[in-house]
Amino acid sequence: MTFFTIVLRSLTRRPVRTGLTLVGISIGIGAVVTLVGLAWGYEKGVAKQLDVVGVDVVVSNMSGGLMPKMFDESLQQKVAVLPRVVETTAVLMQMLSVEDAPIMMISGREWGGFAWHKMKVIEGRMPNDGSEKAVVLGTLAAEMLKKKVGDTVQIEVEELKVVGIVDGQAMMENGTIFLSLEVMQAVTGNEGKINFVDIRVPPNTSKAEIERLCQDIKVVFPEGRAMVASEVVGTSQGFRVVRAMSWSTSLLAIIVGVLGVMNTMLMTVFERTHEIGILLAVGWRRRRIVYMVLCESALLGLLGGMVGVGFGVLGLITLGSSPAIRGFIEPDLNLKLMLISIAIAVVVGVVSGLYPAWRSSRLTPSLALQN
């Protein structure tokens, strides 16, 4: 009988208990894949959206939330005259419940600003001007709301006509309702207010120059912050909170898995006292007994991690197609996340097996053989 055969036999001796332990680990790892995949997907979606629109610097007042506080639109003029600023556009963005959709992104953009330029009209047209009470829908937003050109969409208490459907070239853009800033302010009762100023700088502007621009903006807008677009996701307090919440929630599920594996391995050691005594009597070293128990717990972790990744993938697909998520977050399902999750599961298995392995190494052949 080989070493690996002994490891496998110990796990298959109590198939129900082993199976329940695998389920416990799988749930924890599935939570990691699902929650972290959603968080990463949201971050990547925002980064891609900024890249597609062509934003170099974002000015906002995040204050720790996902949606920043509003401020006076007069700030745009103060920013527009700063050195290295080529073009600015003001934006008022909110997440609201729209008709049957529980939450949708609504973006009021300064009419004529560069934020409109990358949209490709699929059906209908763009609004005639900034005062027309009309909206254009991203392709996913149109599908979710079941709207076509000529229909109306109710935002707050206003009925706005759908004049066009556009391809925004990014998931979050396609899941958004677009209207002019002037109309957005009137509909939501936020006249004169915005929550973003998007900035473009000259091509080939060095990072040092962009950072100097951010410092200049801080002088004219002390309560806010200016961030290089490529660093918005990495430096925003709101995104850090989302990451922390996803990992902390996953950690609770992982802790349950740790306790399950530890309980299984302890029971296995207690039930195999006689077997371990024989192995010690025939010449096995204590460190080999420890290694055997750790291999068993690591194998449990590996199998649980692989099944858990499957659960997580299923969870991401299910949530990604749900009305609350679809068009707002594109779950990030990649090999890196899968490998990290499986590695976590293996570490969970090894850590869970440390105490049972130590207990097994304390047995003596004479005492073990008496039981």
Image: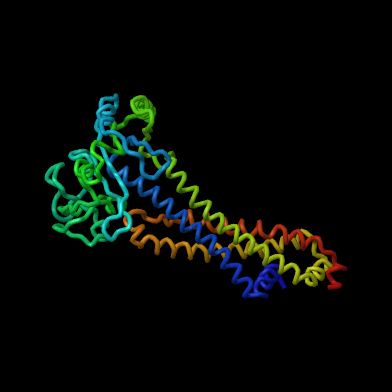
Residue 70 at x, y percent in the picture: 32, 38
Please give the name of the residue rendered at 80% of the width and 61% of the height, measured from the top-left corner. Answer: 285
Give the vertical position of 131 relative to 40 (above or below): above
Left-right relation of 80 to 313: left
The quarter of the image holding the C terminus is: bottom right
Left-right relation of 301 to 97: right
Residue 270 at x, y percent in the picture: 76, 69
Left-right relation of 217 to 296: left
Please give the name of the residue rendered at 36% of the width and 41% of the height, measured from the top-left corner. Answer: 68
Q: How is the image coloured?
A: rainbow
Quadrant of residue 88 within the rendered picture: top left
Number of marks in picture: 0
Find the residue positioned furthest to the right: 366
Name the one closer to the observer, 201 or 218. Answer: 218
Residue 96 at x, y percent in the picture: 30, 51
* Camera sees residue 363: yes
Name the one closer to the observer, 316 or 61. Answer: 61
The quarter of the image holding the N terminus is: bottom right
Quadrant of residue 369 within the rendered picture: bottom right
Residue 98 at x, y percent in the picture: 27, 55
Find the residue positioned furthest to the left: 128
Name the one closer to the observer, 319 or 168. Answer: 319
* Camera sees residue 303: no
